[in-house]
């Protein structure tokens, strides 16, 4: 078939033997102009606000990471973490762990991740760096976790072998 522009277009093609022919869509010539479509807002909706592009993070998107240090028994320091550990919050976790590892020379350090709801690769990197530092400083690093959000990234990456993982604080070995 030849269209009004002189281009040839096949409108049908043969199917496999014994099957009916199926219609095929024709390619439109590049000279065809598509009609302009107008965006009509729905009743009761407001127009979209222009985005802020000043580089500052949107305060509504920030997820706070809670960290707290405790010493439930002699020779054991616990860092309790709550929230999501992602690219935005991993630096805060890194700072807290750095301060903890630079502090008093407790031989055992526990990282209580029971309240962590998400562990991104950036947070996993912080944990791995801390495990290496603990090994270098001859410290024991114990991770307290039962949530899949924490255990799965540790297992999939093979980094679980860097830690002693226990289900709760009472399972931490030692005095």
Image (tube, rainbow, N blue to C red):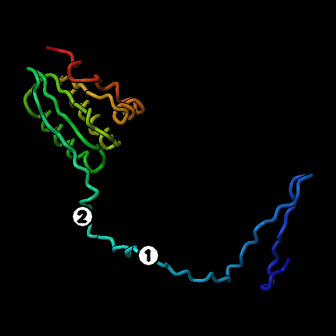
Between residues 57 and 50, which one lies in front from this camera angle? Answer: 50
Q: Pointer 1: what residue?
A: 43
Nearer-N-terminus badge (1/2): 1
Q: What separation in Å lies between label 1 and label 2 (alpha carbons)?
A: 33 Å
The image shows residue 16, relative to residue 12, as above or below, that is: above
Considering the image in quadrants, where does the C terminus appear? top left
Secondary structure beneath dot 2 equals loop
Q: Where does residue 152 sit, x and y in percent of width and height?
A: 39, 32
Q: Where does residue 80 sit, x and y in percent of width and height?
A: 19, 34
Between residues 29 and 20, which one lies in front from this camera angle? Answer: 20
Q: Which residue lies furthest to the top in this view?
A: 175
28 relative position to 165: left or right: right
Q: Where does residue 17 sit, x and y in percent of width and height?
A: 91, 52
Q: Residue furthest bottom?
A: 4
Q: How crowded is mark 2: few (under 14 residues within 10 Å), some or many (20 or more)?
A: few
Between residues 160 and 173, which one lies in front from this camera angle? Answer: 173
Q: Pointer 2: what residue?
A: 56
Q: Where does residue 99 sit, x and y in percent of width and height?
A: 12, 38
Q: Residue at x 20, y 27 (%)?
A: 110
163 relative position to 32: left or right: left
Marker count (numbered): 2
Q: How crowded is mark 1: few (under 14 residues within 10 Å), some or many (20 or more)?
A: few
The image shows residue 74, relative to residue 101, as above or below, that is: above
Mark toward the viewer: 1 or 2: 1
């Amino acid at each position: 078939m030849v269209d009004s522009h002189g281009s040839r277009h096949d409108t049908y093609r043969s199917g496999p033997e014994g099957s009916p022919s199926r219609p095929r869509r024709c390619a439109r010539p590049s000279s065809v102009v598509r009609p302009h479509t107008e965006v009509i807002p729905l009743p009761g909706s407001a127009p979209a606000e222009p985005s802020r592009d000043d580089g500052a993070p949107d305060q509504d998107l920030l997820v706070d990471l809670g960290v707290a240090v405790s010493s439930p028994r002699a020779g054991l320091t616990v860092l309790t973490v709550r929230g999501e550990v992602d690219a935005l919050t991993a630096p805060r976790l890194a700072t807290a762990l750095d301060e903890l590892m630079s502090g008093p020379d407790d031989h055992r350090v526990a990282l209580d991740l029971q309240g962590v709801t998400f562990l991104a690769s950036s947070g996993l990197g912080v944990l791995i760096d801390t495990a290496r530092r603990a090994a270098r400083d001859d410290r024991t690093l114990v991770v307290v976790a039962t949530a899949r959000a924490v255990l799965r990234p540790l297992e999939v990456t093979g980094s679980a072998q860097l830690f002693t993982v226990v289900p709760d604080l009472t399972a931490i070995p030692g005095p």
